[in-house]
Image (spheres, rainbow, N blue to C red):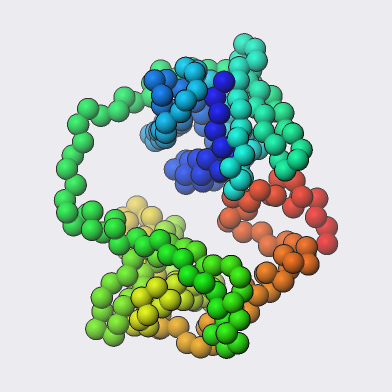
Amino acid sequence: MITITRRLAQQLRAVLRRAFGTRGPGPALCFTADAGTLSVRARIADIAVTYSEATTGPAETLWLPFQFLDDCASKRDDQVHVEVTGKGRCTAQWRDGSVPQIVQYDSPEPPAADTFPAAPENFAENPVRLLRALADEVAAEAPLVDPDSGEDLGVPLVGVIDLVLDNVAGPLIVDFKTAARSSEPMEISNEIQLSSYAWLHRQITGRQEGGMEIRSLIKTKQAKCEFHPYPARTEVHFRRLFSVIREYLDALDRGTFNFRPGWNCGLCDFCTGPCRAWAG
């Protein structure tokens, strides 16, 4: 038997979808517990991903379809137990609130199971400037206190700021994106994200940003990076930000879950059940 948490399933799904793409069923997953280490592996023709963590479970190897992660992924830390229940079959068990879930999966070992690349024996040394650049990605958390009324909304704002650079006008907050073709991002479509970054930065550092910038990697045949500057946030930006957050929290309190499809539907616990059944 192999045991993981539903939270780990969600994290694995998010990482693997980014690595392999969001379309299609996704590759088969190999779960291996051996010598106190649980490894999860997946690969396609030119991409291979491995995740490892400590485990106390017995030695075991089993294969599961990618659908397994879609089924049990959640922000909860509830355990998911998976065991082989027959030739080419596995059964996964977990609880969704108070409701037990038992799902059987066909899990034949794929023909290319033994072609997963071996881990390199030696790793190249990373220059100091690369390590400093990686450290510039800042995880941040700050209380949501309405700047007009002074009301604490009762939940924190949590996020990761990609990069903050010193600039003549003040700190420059940078967000990295990718795009299939060259185009100017619509500021209004990124307003909530940029305003959230500015709020986090101001609350943590006590400094007002000098400006905002989106840097887009254009994934064309000849890749290039485009820089899109935006002004520092104003009182109007923050008033709009808090209005949107308050509307969302009020909807949660009322139990009103409006249909808002988008790219993050694949990370939502309700996308394959209640959301599809919702009709107003």
User: Measured from the top left, where is residue 211 in percent x and y?
Assistant: 36, 80
> Is 119 situated above or below 272?
above
User: Measured from the top left, where is residue 5 in percent x and y?
Assistant: 56, 37
User: Measured from the top left, where is residue 83 in percent x and y?
Assistant: 60, 20
Which quarter of the figure is the N terminus placed in? top right
**Looking at the image, which is closer to me, 24 or 155?**
155
Q: Is residue 75 left or right of residue 258?
A: left
Tell which residue pokes out farthest to the right in this image: 280
User: Measured from the top left, where is residue 60 in percent x and y?
Assistant: 50, 17
Rendering quarter of residue 23: top right
Number of marks in picture: 0
The residue depicted at 57 percent of the width and 81 percent of the height is: 146
The residue depicted at 18 percent of the width and 57 percent of the height is: 129
> Is 123 situated above or below 157?
above
Q: Is residue 189 visible?
A: yes
Tell which residue pokes out farthest to the top in this image: 87
> Is 189 situated above or below 234?
above
**Looking at the image, which is closer to me, 86 or 156?**
156
Q: Is residue 184 visible?
A: no
Rendering quarter of residue 139: bottom left
> Is 254 situated above or below 69?
below
The residue depicted at 67 percent of the width and 33 percent of the height is: 94
Which quarter of the figure is the C terminus placed in? bottom right
The residue depicted at 58 percent of the width and 55 percent of the height is: 264
